[in-house]
Image (cartoon, rainbow, N blue to C red):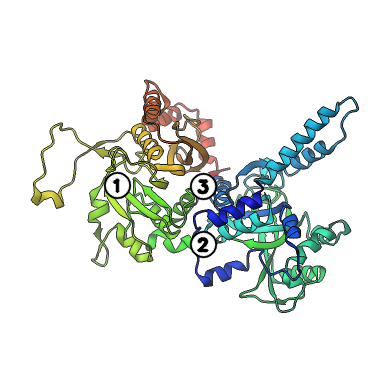
């Protein structure tokens, strides 16, 4: 089945993606390359054109560096159901293609040629069914660059991704249908005007009304990275492009029908020190059709403006990224077993999810607190403040002792959470030191605080993976944070489960010594209690890495205390750049 057919099938039969208002969708539509075409084409011609791969440019915000590609890959899966291949050098695929089409030696038999042909055909088919990352200019060493290439299998897939990015991306600043690039603006102009590129440029122009009718509006965005383009320079750049490409539409600054983007990336080895330590990469110019960008919707959920907060409330920007990694959409059933003040569920509810939360602290989820205005506020207040649907339920429970029946399975589409790992708040679980608990008198039940016991990190993580393997549907996603030590100890360890497959890990450095990893796992098979029990017993065998993680902080300080003065000085001087050391 081709990528286009898969996309059409999913759009017709899949769960409804989060909707937007008519006004929002109207403003979003100008960014998607679905503008009305002025030419009449047959269905066969449209299918042929749609099978052509589309080279996109993802211009990222310079934040959460290791989260950028995983977020886009999650949105690709959400929009099209297709996977993304890992990044390659921009020239590697060209070399592979040239090698595949090179003539074979005379000594090869006909069957050998047939096998190679079939292999090439399989590779081509496989390529058609997925998106493909390409490293920025400069290759892998420039991976901190915000300018990444993404090749879409079809134009329909590219448009579907653009729509989803417009609706919900946090880290994509611009998604561009890349028309041309060069080391100077003159190179871009020459490339667009070159005779060998005329057919491709004309094909792009044929799909866009602003090149054919005067009743269509357009707008240019001129941008710079590492430098600011002056107004006069912006005008000169735009004037050259308009004259070269032959626009017939009118310029409209507020609500244009079509958008175009030209950008100068000017952060090279020579001047990187002069621009606040930004990562160095190739000096390049880019031009193309502006397909979309993240709309910054998460800014309205800023923590300082929220009525009910706690010391561990998840940052609104990160909560939105977590919701994207969980592929939360309208109608999704989402569970947070460590809900706290509900920050993560607020982001999930924004996308239309049906949410359920659990927390062991009855004071947080039920009693709340008194605001500065003297009003009682609680978790529900956060949802009411933003006009979001309230959670289906908030339960006093913990991952160690869930309130669901033993037969409960495959309930949730996503489990998104931030487990307690003992940095700002240690974990607690139901139970206490006393073996024989007395029944709480009826008159004290409303004010009673159930006793709790210490919840070791190893047990908390094992319980989380078990409940996810049981309560998620097959294909459902677990998204959670896991503590790490920035490469000092146990860097490669990650808890596993026989029913869950690891999909993404994104690391965020918080201090010089400690950080956290955002882990995304997918349930790939039905819950098997016997298999899960055997795996758990093995994970808790004496001396296992899971048990060693209970003493993560002590292990880190033991290493640091024995480091040489030179190593300590190097660690202190190592720069942190937007949540990643570079």
Q: Which residue is mark 2?
A: 296
Query: From the viewer's perspective, is the residue at label 1 or at label 3 nearer?
Result: 1
Label 3's element?
A: loop
1 or 3: tag closer to the N-terminus: 1
Q: Alpha carbon of mark 1 to alpha carbon of mark 3: how far? A: 28 Å
Foreground label between 3 and 2: 2
Give the labeled residue for mark 1.
Answer: 359
Q: Earlier in the sequence, mark 1 or mark 2?
A: 2
- Disc 2 element: loop
CA–CA distance in space, label 3 to label 2: 19 Å
Relative image position of residue 308 (x, y in whole percent): 31, 59
Q: Is residue 228 visible?
A: no
Q: Nearer the viewer, residue 431 or 207?
A: 207
Badge 1 vs badge 2, beta-carbon distance below 8 Å: no
Location of mark 3 (residue): 579
Quadrant that contains the C terminus: top right
């Amino acid at each position: 089945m081709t990528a286009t057919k898969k996309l059409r099938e999913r759009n017709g039969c899949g769960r409804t993606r989060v909707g937007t208002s008519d006004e929002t969708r109207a403003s979003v539509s100008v960014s998607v390359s679905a503008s009305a075409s002025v030419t009449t084409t047959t269905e066969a011609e449209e299918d042929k054109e749609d099978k052509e791969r589309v080279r996109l440019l993802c211009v990222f915000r310079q934040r959460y560096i290791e989260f950028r590609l995983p977020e886009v890959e999650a949105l690709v899966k959400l929009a099209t159901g297709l996977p993304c291949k890992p990044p390659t050098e921009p020239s590697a695929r060209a070399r592979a293609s040239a090698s595949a089409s090179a003539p074979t030696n005379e000594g090869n038999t006909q069957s050998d040629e047939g096998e190679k042909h079939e292999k090439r055909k399989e590779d081509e088919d496989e390529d058609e069914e997925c998106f493909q990352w390409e490293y920025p200019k400069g290759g892998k060493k420039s991976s901190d660059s915000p300018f990444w290439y993404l090749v879409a299998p079809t134009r329909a897939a590219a448009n579907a991704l653009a729509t989803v990015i417009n609706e919900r991306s946090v880290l994509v600043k611009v998604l561009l249908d890349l028309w041309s690039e060069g080391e100077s603006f003159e190179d871009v102009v020459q490339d667009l005007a070159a005779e060998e590129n005329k057919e491709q440029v004309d094909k792009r122009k044929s799909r866009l009304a602003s090149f054919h009718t005067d009743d269509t509006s357009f707008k240019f965005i001129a941008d710079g990275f590492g430098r600011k383009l002056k107004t006069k320079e912006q005008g000169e750049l735009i004037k050259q492009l308009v004259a070269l490409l032959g626009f017939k539409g009118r310029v409209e600054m507020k609500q244009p029908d079509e958008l175009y983007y030209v950008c100068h990336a000017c952060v090279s080895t020579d001047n990187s020190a002069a621009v606040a330590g930004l990562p160095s990469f190739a000096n390049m110019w880019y031009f193309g059709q502006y397909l979309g960008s993240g709309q910054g919707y998460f800014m309205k959920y800023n923590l300082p403006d929220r009525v009910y907060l706690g010391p561990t409330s998840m940052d609104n920007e990160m909560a939105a990224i977590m919701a994207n990694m969980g592929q939360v959409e309208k109608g999704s059933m989402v569970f947070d077993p460590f809900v706290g003040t509900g920050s993560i569920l607020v982001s999930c509810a924004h996308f239309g999810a049906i949410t359920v939360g659990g927390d062991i602290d009855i004071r947080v989820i039920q009693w709340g607190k008194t605001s500065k205005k003297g009003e009682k506020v609680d978790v529900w207040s956060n949802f009411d403040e933003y006009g979001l649907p309230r959670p289906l339920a908030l339960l006093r429970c913990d991952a160690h002792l869930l309130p669901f029946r033993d037969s409960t399975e495959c309930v949730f589409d996503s489990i998104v959470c931030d487990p307690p790992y003992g940095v700002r708040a240690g974990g607690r679980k139901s139970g206490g030191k006393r073996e024989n608990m007395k029944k709480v008198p009826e008159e004290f039940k409303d004010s009673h605080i159930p006793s709790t016991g210490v919840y070791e990190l190893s047990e908390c993580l094992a319980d989380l993976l078990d409940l996810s393997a049981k309560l998620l549907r097959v294909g459902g996603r677990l998204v959670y944070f896991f503590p790490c030590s920035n490469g000092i100890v146990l860097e490669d360890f990650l808890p596993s489960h026989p029913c869950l497959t690891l999909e993404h890990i994104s690391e965020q450095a918080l201090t010089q010594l400690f950080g956290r990893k955002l882990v995304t796992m997918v349930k790939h098979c039905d819950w098997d209690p016997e298999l899960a029990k055997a795996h758990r017993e093995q994970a808790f065998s004496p001396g296992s890495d899971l048990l060693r993680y209970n003493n993560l902080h002590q292990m880190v300080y033991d290493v640091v205390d024995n480091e040489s003065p030179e190593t300590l000085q190097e660690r202190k001087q190592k720069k942190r750049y937007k949540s990643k050391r570079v």
